[in-house]
């Protein structure tokens, strides 16, 4: 196991509930030496920045509207992450599109949590409540969350962890969203970060292999 501290950047666009789950896991000693070193927001004034401030974590706002293109924004983002000596990038409700400049500088080092069991209800347009609305409309009996490695194709990268959650007959998109966050997202995202920090994740083709399992 690698004992060197891994520096983690969490990228956010909103309230930061998954960020909070990671902060709580770090405080409990569950990130195996991983340290949240930077919270980077795609717009100012989001509550996730307050969470960072309340926990003494450095933060940075890179507002998408300040850049003329996805390419210009992606370069600035990648440069900021490299300057902060980041080892692992976690997308936690980060709703801004980035291009291959970021992926190429952090190959197999970007994790995303998606509120469904990929390959169901994923890809372009499937974010936030849209995911849960689609799941309920389809009438699925289970949904859940997926942590995957980010690649240029939306929600198509190698899957690290998944956890299923029961869908109830009286669920609304909001109630299903809440249950998936509490029972799946907030559990498997910190676990995936822990596995990364322990150097237990190996990627081969489109598959992730976890050492010690």
Image (cartoon, helix red, strand yellow):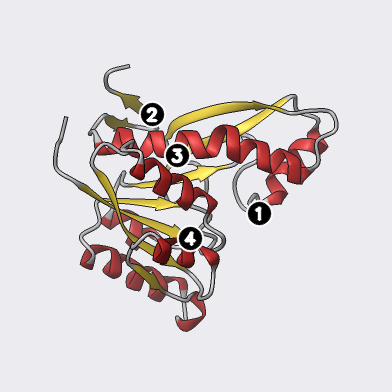
Look at the numbered disc 2 and give the secondary structure of its residue: strand
Gap between marks 3 and 1 measured at Cα:
22 Å
**In the rendering, which numbered label is found on residue 189?**
3
Q: Earlier in the sequence, mark 3 or mark 4?
A: 4
Residue 185: mark:
none
- Name the image quarter holding the N terminus: top left
Distance in Å between CA atoms under marks 3 and 4: 14 Å
| Disc 2: which residue | 207
* Label 2 packing within 10 angstroms: few (<14), some (14-19), many (20+): few
Circles 4 and 1 in contact, beta carbons < 8 Å: no
Residue at the farthest right position: 170
Q: Tell me the residue at 79%/34% (across/down).
A: 138
Q: Residue beneath label 1, please? A: 125
Between discs 2 and 3, the one toward the N terminus: 3
**Between tags 3 and 1, which lies in front?**
3
Question: Label 3: few (<14), some or many (≥20) within 10 Å?
Answer: many
Q: CA distance from mark 2 to mark 3?
A: 18 Å
Sequence order check, earlier mark of 2 and 4:
4
Choose the circle earlier in sequence order: 4 or 1.
4
Q: Is residue 204 above or below residue 212?
A: below
Horizontal and vertical percent for residue 197?
26, 39
Mark 3 vs 1, N-terminal side: 1
The residue sitting at the top extreme is: 213
| Residue 150 visible in rendering | no
The dot on residue 12 is 4
Report crowding for label 1: few under 14, some 14 to 19, many 20 or more residues within 10 A (C-alpha). Answer: few
Camera-nearest label, 2 or 3: 3
Residue 163 is at least partly visible in this image: yes
How many numbered discs sit on the rendered protein?
A: 4
The residue under the point 46% across, 46% down is 112
Mark 1 in CB contact with mark 2 (< 8 angstroms)? no
């Amino acid at each position: 196991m690698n004992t060197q501290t891994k520096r983690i950047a969490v990228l956010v666009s909103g309230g930061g509930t998954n960020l909070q789950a990671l902060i709580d896991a770090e405080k409990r000693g569950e990130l195996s030496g991983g340290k949240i070193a930077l919270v980077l927001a795609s717009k100012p004034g989001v509550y996730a920045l307050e969470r960072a401030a309340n926990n003494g974590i450095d933060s940075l706002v890179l507002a998408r509207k300040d850049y003329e293109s996805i390419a210009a924004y992606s370069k600035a983002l990648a440069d900021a992450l490299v300057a902060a000596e980041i080892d692992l990038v976690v997308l936690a409700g980060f709703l801004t599109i980035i291009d291959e400049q970021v992926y190429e500088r952090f190959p197999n080092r970007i994790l995303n949590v998606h509120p469904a069991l990929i390959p169901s209800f994923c890809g372009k347009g499937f974010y936030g409540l849209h995911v849960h609305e689609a799941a309920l409309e389809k009438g699925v009996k289970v949904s859940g969350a997926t942590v995957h490695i980010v690649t240029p194709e939306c929600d198509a990268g190698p899957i690290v962890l998944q956890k299923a959650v029961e869908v109830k007959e009286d669920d609304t998109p909001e109630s299903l969203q809440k249950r998936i966050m509490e029972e799946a997202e907030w559990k498997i995202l910190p676990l995936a970060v822990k596995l990364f920090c322990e150097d237990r994740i190996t990627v081969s083709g489109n598959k992730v292999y976890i050492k010690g399992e």
